[in-house]
Amino acid sequence: MNKKGLFFTVIVIAMFLVLFFLSNNYLSRVKDFEGNLKGTLVSDQIRFIEDSIVFEYYTKIIDLKPGTIERIGEGQIRIDFPNAGRLPSLENKTEMIRLYKNYTEGRLSQLSNVNITLINFYPNLTIVPYGSVFMKEGNNLTFYNFNYTWLKKVVIELKVNESEDDIDSISVPSDGDDSYPSIKVKIRDTSGSGKGRGEEILDEDVNLNPSTKNSFVINFSSGSSVRVDFGRFNGHDGTFITHVNKLFANVTLFEVKYKAVNQTVKALGGNFTLTKLNFTKNTELVIASE
Amino acid sequence: MSKGIIFSLDVLMALLLAVIFSTFIFFSINQSYSNYDELFLHKAAIDTLAVLREDRSLENFDNSSILTFLNSLPAQYCANLTVYGNNDAIVYNSLKSGCSNEGEVVGISRRVFLVNSTSVYLGEVKVWYE
């Protein structure tokens, strides 16, 4: 009788132990699943924030997207900007991007519980490895060539909303040594519509010393003017600036050629880091690449 | 008499063990409640904000377009869009027709956006089950 009771008790305990292990196993599987679920939520959130930042940067801030970066032979790399838009561009982009950065890193970070850091987030783009920095703000389209020895040629064509008949004066810098970068400037007047249309006001291709001040200037009788500078401007050698004053100019052609390098040439617009729980996403804003 | 006591003790112990095991198993399973709703609502909130961004109705504060889209969400979803200005002041709010209080589980998505390249706003979409 006692043996039967003991046997019964052992069987009952064994059955409950089986139940215990089964439920424990189920629990650990559910916990794993919940971990994955949380991971999905966090990665979704991070991806959405990343997508939003890229969208704002591309569509509203940069306004100067490179089209193609290609090797064209003769040991050169060509970068063109088919969507260089017009001048003047928006004023005060620096302030706009500061507001955007502050709001994103501050309020959005706090509310979403995601640590967002925008690094080198400015309204400009950098061509690596050459280190050229391009920007368009207000009346100026500017690019700095901190290492101008790589620069071979710059071509810019502008279509201004002034007539050839109203030209007051034109000045063109004198041609320099063949070893200097070649700067080609084409300016067309308001007649005709579209790319390549309009009377030709200026079509000059000269080699210019990057360490001196060189300017193409066209003044109109209305008091408006358009100027293309190359050389030592804003305290840097090899600086290229297109400046408009009291007129509009469509940038119908803009391309830059460099000496080729054995590295991938990319256009970068800063980067950003997003962190939440154990997830970290570091993204470069690659605007164009070879 | 002693056999009866032993039998009663045996039954009591078995019952006690049964209660302990059952309670443990019950609470274990009960605690493992997975909130799938949050995931689905979160995805719906992200989709909603992405669509409002792509059709530019968010940037333009286009009330009819926003409301049309919110009302076209599946019947079981409720959604609310709020846009905050620079000082956290609400500058725009739109709630799907027929919805009122937020549910217990809410999916939220947010994005910062520029309007006319001069002003910065924070858009927030909340989605919950009706």
Image (cartoon, coloured by chain):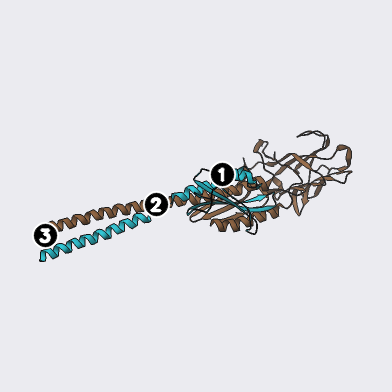
Chain colours: A brown, B cyan
Give x and y (percent) for residue B86. 65, 57
Q: Quadrant of the C terminus of chain A?
A: top right
- Circle nearer the viewer, 2 or 3: 3
Give B118 or A253, whichever is nearer the viewer.
B118
The tag earlier along the polypeptide, 2 or 3, is 3
Indicate the quadrant where residue A176 lies. Answer: top right
The three-letter amino acid code for the residue at tag 1 is Asn
- Circle nearer the viewer, 2 or 1: 1
Give x and y (percent) for residue A14. 22, 55
Q: Are marks 2 and 3 on the same chain?
A: yes
Count of marks overlaid on the render: 3
Marked residue chain, label 2: A
Give B49 or A117, whichever is nearer the viewer.
B49
Q: CA distance from mark 2 to mark 1?
A: 37 Å
Q: Disc number at residue A114?
A: none
The three-letter amino acid code for the residue at tag 3 is Asn
Q: What residue is rendered at 47% in x and 49% in y?
A: B39
Q: Image check: A277 left or right of B53?
A: left
Please, what secondary structure does the residue beneath circle 1 have?
helix
Marked residue chain, label 3: A
* Residue under numbered circle 2: A32
Please, what secondary structure does the residue beneath circle 2 have?
helix
* Residue under numbered circle 1: B71
- Circle nearer the viewer, 3 or 1: 1
Q: Are marks 3 and 1 on the same chain?
A: no
* Residue under numbered circle 3: A2
Please, what secondary structure does the residue beneath circle 3 have?
helix
Circle 1 packing at 10 Å, graded few (<14), some (14-19), many (20+), is: some
